[in-house]
Amino acid sequence: MFEEAQYFAPVAEQGDGSVVVELAASHPGFADQVYRARRNAIAALAVNHRLGEPIPAAEYTEQEHEIWALVAGELAIKHRKYATAEYLDGAARLGLPDERIPQLEEVSELLEPLTGFRYLPAAGLVPLRDFYGVLADGYFHSTQYIRHHSVPFYTPEPDVIHEVIGHANALANDRFAALYRLAGAAARRVESEEALEFVSKVFWFTMEFGVMAESDELRAYGAGILSSYGEVEEFRGMDIRPLDLREMGRTQYDITKYQDVLFRAESMQHLEDVVGAFWETCDDDTIASLT
Ligand SMILES: [Fe+2]
């Protein structure tokens, strides 16, 4: 039977103050009660966190640290071949640990001196306006849990490997960090839900799944590609289209599959000129004229 994969698992707060993460039956950790208890405890950290407080440390097992070490090691090898220079520059500056999962507070401590960004814990899906809006202030909402150990190279949800390896390495680069901030400013500026959705789709096709020409080959800078062991090998074979705001706003995507339509920037400058300039100035009217 086909069961649709989940993106963020729903998080429910109970009357007694406890927090329950509702994993789908298809989730690799569904039947693992120990994993589920840890997921609930980690989600509760985010639910109870207040801005300005340090992020409480999540409890990980040795097995989970080993998953990080395995996946981070494999991704680092692929990044040398497939990631853009600006992303690799961010990774080198940030210096994430490769043998264990870093706590989000530690990621913030590494990142803030570089580009001013800090991490905030997210239990699951964060409403679009909050998720994007705080980027303007240099905050990035991030999940803290890690994928289930039975399938180290697969996750149905964005986990700490995606959030930190995919996003923090980009956020450690000045030019990408500036683009994230502009996306946040755009999300704050627009008023209608349609315009916000458009801003978020442009983010999806760039900061999550963007690819770029570099030295006569195609490289990736999107966090979704660079944190996915499978997609990082496949993106060059996808339907690659020119960087076009209208097309990005129009293209539907399925979060449960490999992203098969990708948009190509010709350079970092091109990305800044098209997407950065759009986020810097867009409002409901300019977006309506694009849809
Ligand atoms: Fe992401």
Image (cartoon, grey):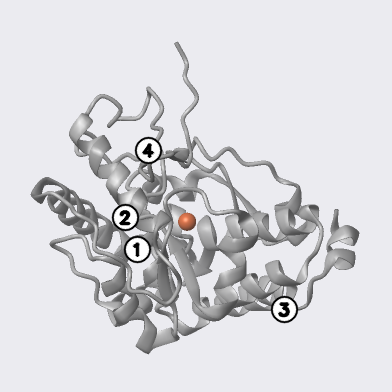
Label 4 amino acid? Val
Label 1 amino acid? Val
> Does residue 245 appear in this view?
yes
Which residue is labeled 3 in the image? 280
Which residue is labeled 4 in the image? 20
- Looking at the figure, which quarter contains the N terminus? top left
Q: Secondary structure at mark 4?
A: strand
Of pointers 4 and 1, the one earlier in the residue sequence? 4
Which residue: 32% across, 62% down?
79
Of tags 3 and 4, the one toward the viewer is 4
Distance (Cα) linking label 3 and label 1: 25 Å
Distance (Cα) linking label 2 and label 1: 5 Å
Label 3 amino acid? Glu
Which residue: 27% across, 36% down?
36
> Outermost residue toward the bottom?
113
Which residue is labeled 1 in the image? 164
Which residue is labeled 2 in the image? 161
Of pointers 3 and 4, the one earlier in the residue sequence? 4
Of pointers 4 and 2, the one earlier in the residue sequence? 4
Between 244 and 61, the one nearer to me in the picture: 61
